[in-house]
Amino acid sequence: MKEYYEFLALRVSQPFAEYFSCVIPSEILKKISFSLKAVNVDGVVQGVQRSINNKRLQEISKFIDGESAAFPNSIILGANFLETGRYAEESDRCLVEKNGDFYTIKIPKNSEVLSIIDGQHRLYAFDYAETQMDLLCAIYIDLAMPYQAFLFSTINYNQGKVDKSLAYQLFGYELDNEEPINWPPETLAVYLVRLLNNKKPLLNRIKYRTADEIQRKNKDISWRISTASIVEAILSLISKNPKDDRYLMNSKRYAGESKIYGRDVLIDDTDYPLRNLYIHGNDKAIEEVLSLALEATDDVFWKYLDDDNFLKKTVGIACIFKFLKAVLLKHGVSKVVIKVKFTDYLIEIKKHEDFSDSTLYPSSTKGMSDAYKKMLFLSGL
């Protein structure tokens, strides 16, 4: 059985996104968090976040061991994304449970699913200190990497702590209007999610930012899915390791120059059916493939299912994209494959299974695995 650290928390809603404020002991936080690596030196990415300054760590550690030690500002964390940039498996994610007027944050033990958006020097200074203490933390759940980039840049770039280019290297997210051909996988995925959320069948069904929720026109939408789940589904068709792709793309062509390689440096991988389109900048074709697949799923399944059906849950969406990937790998990428093959497979599956039995298909990793195997079996793939 999975073991968790549990922390009582307050929910804080702000225009950018909601987060949970809680207290985590420094010795535990070090075990369950990580910093994103991203310093570009002569075209090679090195270091951890902004390069760790050992002298600064020593100075902070002395402060920690002193009688005046105080860190009233929050360590800012993003939950449920791995160091590779991928969305954590269902069984490895942080959980949020209502607890009276408060919430309980449950973080898996022996896992690193908290990325440090801001506060790495404060935390790592405890490695040099004799004292350990409670730390105030602000945890953003399922905050996709480009949104973490925005937050990191807002905190550090606007306050003059880090230059804009490092924010770009760290997250692959430019504050200015960067050319789409230079968008790393996560940024493209978030862009596509925004497009999909503005048209049927996912119109207003993708939930993330608090400001988006406030401005949402149709407040009667029933079933909803998170930005993170769709971002991960798209990435599963494009990249084995989004972080490595991001670092390669953001390497400079020549030392001392600002021009980066972009997608040209990436190598195709036939295990990821939309990767070739991505490398060649054919983002419109990727959008079309996703739109056609979602429309087919809606026409065959979603329109006729109850809102609590497995296929309308986060794990169900992941299952559908996993099946889509299997179809594309077998038949190739084309309109005909989506409109005919993929749709026919879904029709054949629905003749025998509508995934309404929650005991057979619970909202869990096992439920997704069983549903995917059932899809493969019924479709003959």
Image (tube, rainbow, N blue to C red):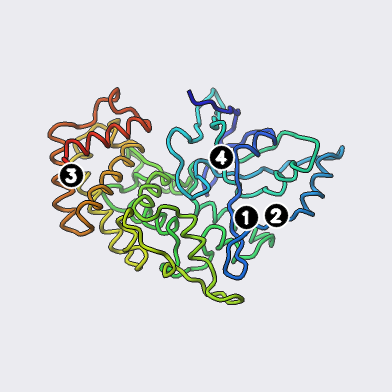
- Viewer-nearest of labels 2 and 3? 2
Q: CA distance from mark 2 to mark 1?
A: 8 Å
Residue 271: horizontal and vertical position, in percent? 32, 53
Whether pointer 2 and pointer 1 mark residues with C-beta atoms closer than 8 Å, the reply is yes
- Residue type at tag 4: Glu
Q: Earlier in the sequence, mark 1 or mark 3?
A: 1
Mark 1 and mark 3 in contact? Answer it, CB < 8 Å: no
- In the picture, the disc for residue 52 is 2
Q: Earlier in the sequence, mark 2 or mark 4?
A: 2
Give the distance between the C-alpha atoms of the residues marked 4 and 3, in whole angstroms. Answer: 39 Å
Q: Earlier in the sequence, mark 4 or mark 3?
A: 4
Disc 1 crowd, CA 10 A, few/some/many (<14, 14-19, 20+)? many
List x then y, in percent, for residue 76.
62, 45
Tell me the residue that label 3 is attached to. Answer: 299
- Give neighbour class at mark 3: few <14, some 14-19, many 20+ (Cα, 10 Å): some
Q: Earlier in the sequence, mark 1 or mark 4?
A: 1
State the separation of the CA atoms marked 1 and 3: 45 Å
The residue mark sitting in front, 1 or 3, is: 1
